[in-house]
Amino acid sequence: MTNEPKGAATASPAPAADGGLPDPKLARVTLITVALTLFLASTGQSIVSTALPEIVSDLGGLSYITWVVTAYLLASTIGAPIAGKLGDMYGRKIVLQFGIGIFLLGGWIAGAAWNMPILVAGRAVQGFGGGALVVVSMAVVADLLPPRERAKAQGMLSGVFGVSTVLGPLAGGFLVQSEGWHWIFFAYIP
C-alpha cells in the first residue's frame, strides 16, 4: 500500500522517462488551461471595481459597498488552504472542477442579487471558489513540472495576474456601460 493521496494518480500527467519532463504538448495544454483558470479567478477580483457606483445606484446600500470587495478577498483567503488540502487528499482535477463550479455559482448569485446583502453573499461564495482556483492551479504546475522548469511557468502565471488587473476593470466598465452591472457576474458562466 502506498502513501499517495487518493486520486493523486490522476491529478497530473505523468512525467516522461526522458529526464522527468512531461510530454511538451500535454504540458502546454495544461499550462494554458491553468492560465485561463487563474485569469478567471483574478478578474473576479478586479472586474467589480468599475461597477460599484452603478451597483450602489441600483441597489442602494452604500454602507455595504466595501463588503462587495472584502467578502471576495476574505472568502478567497479562507478557501485557498482548504482547497489546497482537499487537492492533496482527492486530486487536483476534481478540486479544480469544484472550484470552478463554486466560482460560477457565486457569480450567478451576485448577478441575480436584488439587494446588497445578497450581492455580498454571492461575492463571498465566488471568492471561496476563486481562492480554490488560485491555489490548486499553482499546485498543478508544481505537480506537472520539475523544479528547474517551474520558474518559467510561474512567471507566465504571474503575467496572467498582471494582465487581469488591467483587463478586469476595462471589461467591467464595458459590460456595465453596454449590458448592465449584472453581466459582470453572468459573463463568466458561458
Image: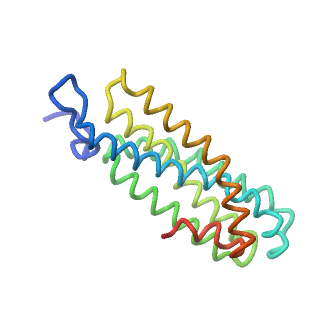
Its colouring scheme is rainbow
Residue 71: quadrant of the picture = bottom right
**Does residue 111 lie above or below 146 as drawn?**
below
- Left or right: residue 187 versus residue 143 is right
The reply, left or right, for residue 114 in relation to residue 104 is right
The image quadrant that residue 113 belongs to is: bottom right
Name the residue at 60% across, 71% down.
Answer: 109
| Closer to the camera in the image, 88 or 185 | 185
Residue 99 appears in which quarter of the rendering? bottom left
Residue 128, image x and y in percent?
A: 55, 54
Q: Position of residue 84 (x, y in %)?
A: 44, 42
Tell me residue 148's x, y (percent): 36, 21
Where is 134 relative to 147, above or below?
below
**Residue at point 65%, 54% (across, down):** 168
Closer to us: 40 or 74:
40
The front one of 41 and 123 is 41
Q: In the rendered image of this protein, does residue 1 appear above or below residue 98?
A: above
Q: Residue at x 40, y 52 (%)?
A: 96
Give the side of residue 74 with respect to residue 78, left or right. right
114 relative to 91 in the view: left or right: right
- Locate residue 15, reporting x and y percent: 22, 33
Residue drawn at x 73%, y 69% as measured from the top left: 176
Q: Is residue 113 above or below residue 47?
A: below
